[in-house]
Amino acid sequence: ERAAGRSVGWIDVSELPDDAWTVTVAGMGGRPPRQGPSPAELSALGLVSEKYPLRATLPAAVRELAAYKGVQVSAVIPIELGSGNTPGPMLVANQLGVPTLDGDYAGRAVPELTNLKPQIFGVPITPIAFVDKWGDVALVREVASTEMADRIGRLLCLGAYSGVGIACYLMQVRDAKRLMVAGTLSKSLALGAARRKALEANDDPVVELAKAAGGWVLFKGEV
């Protein structure tokens, strides 16, 4: 992204007007199997070439969802704190030319869509746009539950023999403020910096991380 001349970072949610639209993106599906389907099986289904390589499914899903609802997206909110689902949304925001908001909808990494703060408040995840690497697009207008939304997404992964990109929780800033865990990206960066500086100074990184997080070291031992 820096090579493309785009800065990497985020802004506070207060910097956007209440009526601006935000969206959440995520990758679903995990790692593909070591031995995938044969070329003949893929060819029989018309799966000859990838339309969206790597994480290109995510901005495609955002465009599909925004077009379906007839709105313009002004910011991206990470769905969780995760190795892929935090930098992924930041990349998507850069690709779309909009900012990333400092926060997420979980405050941690989660295994399922049901483990998010909007779920606690009863806010529906729909509509959802699912896009796979072959260019298949599924728009789910309504679901019986968030559990079913998760199930539908995983069945789409099986059908595509790969992960899918998701765009969901399309909402205005006034609602996102109430539902997101604010400041988590800044906090994560500060914790990472504390660990790096401790290692550079030959200090105990665990102790320094505890200080930076406002916590304490409970015990030490061997595993």
Image (cartoon, helix red, strand yellow):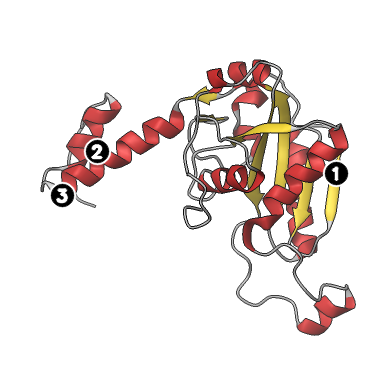
The amino acid type, in three-letter code, at marker 1 is Leu
Q: Residue furthest left?
A: 202
Q: Find out whether the residues at labels 2 and 3 contact each other: C-beta distance under 8 Å.
A: no
The amino acid type, in three-letter code, at marker 2 is Ala
The amino acid type, in three-letter code, at marker 3 is Glu
Query: Is residue 57 something one can see in this rendering?
Result: yes
Q: Taking 178 as reference, is 223 above or below it?
A: below
Q: Find out whether the residues at labels 1 and 2 contact each other: C-beta distance under 8 Å.
A: no
Dot 1 surroundings within 10 Å: few (below 14), some, or many (20 or more)? some
Q: Secondary structure at mark 3?
A: helix
Query: Which residue is depicted at the point 63% across and 42% down?
Result: 97
In the image, taking residue 48 as reference, residue 107 lies left or right, namely left
Residue 70 x, y percent position in the rendering: 86, 32
Q: Secondary structure at mark 1?
A: strand
Query: Is residue 142 something one can see in this rendering?
Result: no
Q: Which residue position holds label 2? A: 194
Q: Secondary structure at mark 2?
A: helix
Q: Which residue position holds label 3? A: 200
Q: Which residue position holds label 1? A: 139
Looking at this view, is 165 or 173 the one in front? 173
Q: Taking 38 as reference, is 168 above or below it?
A: above
Distance from the alpha carbon under mark 3 to that under mark 1: 49 Å
Dot 3 surroundings within 10 Å: few (below 14), some, or many (20 or more)? few
Q: Find out whether the residues at labels 3 and 1 contact each other: C-beta distance under 8 Å.
A: no
Q: Which badge, 2 or 3, is on the more N-terminal residue? A: 2
Residue 67 sits in quarter: top right
Distance from the alpha carbon under mark 1 to that under mark 2: 42 Å
On residue 62, which mark appears?
A: none
In the image, taking residue 99 as reference, residue 73 lies left or right, namely right
Residue 207 x, y percent position in the rendering: 18, 36
